[in-house]
Amino acid sequence: MPATDGRAGDPLVAKLSQFTSLSAADVGILEGLCAREERFGAGASIFEEGDAPRSAFVVTRGLACRYRPLPDGRRQILTFLIPGDFSDLHAFLLKAMDHSVGTIIPTRIAAIERDIVLDIVLHRPRLAAALWWSEMQEAAMLRERIVALGRRNARSRVAYLLCELVWRQQAIGMAEDHSIRLPLTQSDLADALGLTAVHVNRVLQRFREDQLISLERRRLTLLNFVRLEALAGLTSNYLQLNSMPAGAVRYFDDLEQPYRRR
Amino acid sequence: MPATDGRAGDPLVAKLSQFTSLSAADVGILEGLCAREERFGAGASIFEEGDAPRSAFVVTRGLACRYRPLPDGRRQILTFLIPGDFSDLHAFLLKAMDHSVGTIIPTRIAAIERDIVLDIVLHRPRLAAALWWSEMQEAAMLRERIVALGRRNARSRVAYLLCELVWRQQAIGMAEDHSIRLPLTQSDLADALGLTAVHVNRVLQRFREDQLISLERRRLTLLNFVRLEALAGLTSNYLQLNSMPAGAVRYFDDLEQPYRRR
DNA sequence: CGAGGAATTGAGTAGGTTCAAGGCCGGTGG
DNA sequence: CCACCGGCCTTGAACCTACTCAATTCCTCG
């Protein structure tokens, strides 16, 4: 099993493999996509609200977030982007991004050209399906966030976000058991959860008292993930952490045929 | 300009035409998709959390919503589905839906088979682009909801949702100026906005006092949409209500060539 | 005309915010 | 090696927005 520094295999391949088994050719393509990375420092801006979208991108190392800045200086974090996240597959269809993306820690990003995206969609059905699935996973995370912000109290919200972060890092081999590196400040967490940093602090205090988590030196461990998941109110099929339905598998195998011989 | 009863032209065609001009053939395909509709009464369930996804679908008439039921009986409404909304393009890749869809008023839905979806994606690039765009629009709405629930107070949230509903219905020719039919109860609005029905009521009272809206007999009119939009804090490019970038247009025209001769 | 859901109103409460001050910790420069 | 600095975390007290509970009125529809 992989180590904890994010170097263990390609995180994108690891993530998509949860959904469907990838051929050697597909893996090659994915690794090729991530070959030319761009590096950003901590707290850097990758793009901003209003910018023309350039292309899709993959996070290969580090941690970033999508967010919407508000006129009064506050912000709402929409999603965190971890290694293996393939985003904005179709952003080239838009004239302007409606949100910004910035890094939390030093981060590497590989940009993907429009032509490559379309080539995959048109000629690599199985790979395209895997990318669609990862888009749907991102949409599922947005829906879960809405439920959390709309109908859960602060304790549940914090529990939910910590669980999500751990689960996602488990999926790419960046978690040790239920423990991850968590370089987010309490203020970052608050901006994601619609709370204030002060209140996030008090909730985390309670979680520590209750032996639910340990969090020190930027390392988070879920000590009692059963209780945390219950507190978070997450359903078992969250993140669609299961593979493709059998019918769809057969279907894509058939579609692959014409292209396998190229 | 179309009338107010939702019969004026095909709402799906109207919606996608905002994004790109559609060929007669594409319009024909879209209208064909909506030919076989299924009818549901008010308060009916279209599918439920946990169900295996059947296929994509288009709402042709009525009003429905996606929502997540909570264990304690409450719920969070995620999005409202109005005529012309094409949803779940790729849902066939999942084993189980993570949310439910139910109707508010009598509603008609056209189911779209997986094979038809894939045929469009592979052979009708321009139409596929339009459908991707509508998916991105739905994702943009989810992000906007997160911002509203996370960082805005009750007044702004209500203003935002009313504006969104009016804008969307304008886009499909179902609005008269700034006036729409609004069959939602205050409880529905509350479930979408993370508030209680009682508080939604008080906010709406204030809006009426302040001459911002009129709302009676299920008819909403924005009396001062400038102030409402400001209160809602919406950005001008919300809903990506603008057409495809020129570069993308050329690109898809090229892709169309091989298929135009079929 | 009656019934039931929806809207409205009031009073008390609570979860989370705001403001402000102090403490910790890691990094930097002398 | 040590002292300083700045960002982050922590804690307390007052406050406020929105919730809860409950009763009443209004509408719509059969």
Image: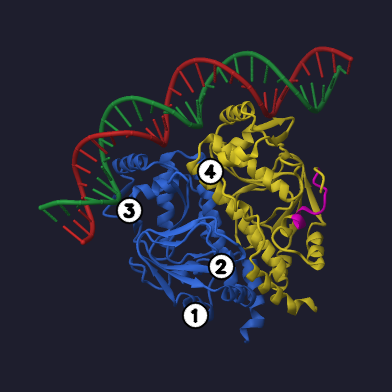
Chain colours: A yellow, B blue, C green, D red
Q: Earlier in the sequence, mark 1 or mark 3?
A: 1
Kindly check if marks 3 and 4 are in contact, taking CB atoms under 8 A apart as contact. Answer: no
Kindly check if marks 2 and 3 are in contact, taking CB atoms under 8 A apart as contact. Answer: no
Q: In this view, does A87 lie to the left or right of B66?
A: right
Label 4 sits on a secondary structure element that is helix
Q: How far apart are marks 4 and 1 (CA)?
A: 41 Å
- Label 4: which residue? A148
The reply to whether residue A204 is visible in this rendering is yes
Instruction: Give the residue type at disc 1.
Output: Gly
- On residue B28, the disc is 1
Numbered range of the magenta stretch: A5-14
Kindly check if marks 4 and 2 are in contact, taking CB atoms under 8 A apart as contact. Answer: no
- On residue B221, the disc is 3
Q: Distance between the residues labelled 3 and 4?
A: 31 Å
- Label 2: which residue? B131
D14 w.r.t. B247: above or below: above
Q: Distance between the residues labelled 4 and 2?
A: 29 Å
Q: Position of residue A121 (x, y in %)?
A: 69, 69
Label 1 or label 3, whichever lies nearer to me, is 1
What chain letter is assigned to the residue under label 3?
B
Label 3 sits on a secondary structure element that is strand
